[in-house]
Amino acid sequence: MMVEESEAAEHVKLIFDMYAKPETSFGDIARYFVEHDITFDGREPKRLTISYILRNPVYVQADLEVYLVFNLHKLHIVGRQLWIGLANQKEGPSGKTKQHNGSL
């Protein structure tokens, strides 16, 4: 289970708010955070960090638009039990079926 850390959550929200402005780049956001002494796990954010946060599905609030984007990219949303069942059907290099517990 994920637990929201209020300060980190505010930083992530700020990243999304800033990136919503078309003229704002990953570099602009990273520079803003450095200039304001905002770090992630004690490290200055880089453009790659900002990109990862913006692409991480953990931060997506699911709605019809998100579903349509996933569908457009042929990505399927499945429940945990189905994920475990599908993962257990796949064979490993030895030809034996791997057993998965559902963790990613």
Image (tube, rainbow, N blue to C red):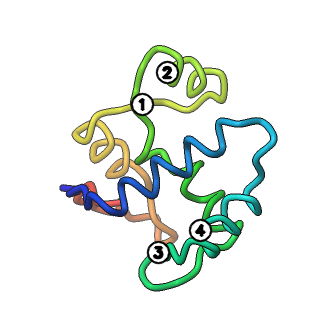
Residue sitting at x 18%, y 55%: 1
What element does badge 3 sit on?
loop
Labels 2, 3: front one? 3
What element does badge 2 sit on?
helix
Label placed on residue 67: 2
Residues at discs 4 and 2 in contact (Cβ within 8 Å): no
> Local crowd at mark 2 within 10 Å, few (<14), some, or many (≥20)?
few
Whole-percent x, y for residue 44 in the image: 58, 80
Labels 4, 1: front one? 4
Label placed on residue 33: 4
Residue sitting at x 76%, y 47%: 24
Question: Label 3 belongs to which residue?
Answer: 40
The C terminus - image quarter: bottom left
Compared across the picture, whether 90 is left or right of 83 comes to right
- What residue type is disc 1 on? Ile
Q: CA distance from mark 4 to mark 2?
A: 31 Å
Residue sitting at x 22%, y 39%: 81
Above or below, 43 against 9 in this view is below
Whole-percent x, y for residue 55 in the image: 59, 48
**Which comes sooner in the sequence, label 3 or label 4?**
4
Whole-percent x, y for residue 69 in the image: 60, 24
- What residue type is disc 4 on? Phe
Compared across the picture, whether 90 is left or right of 84 comes to right
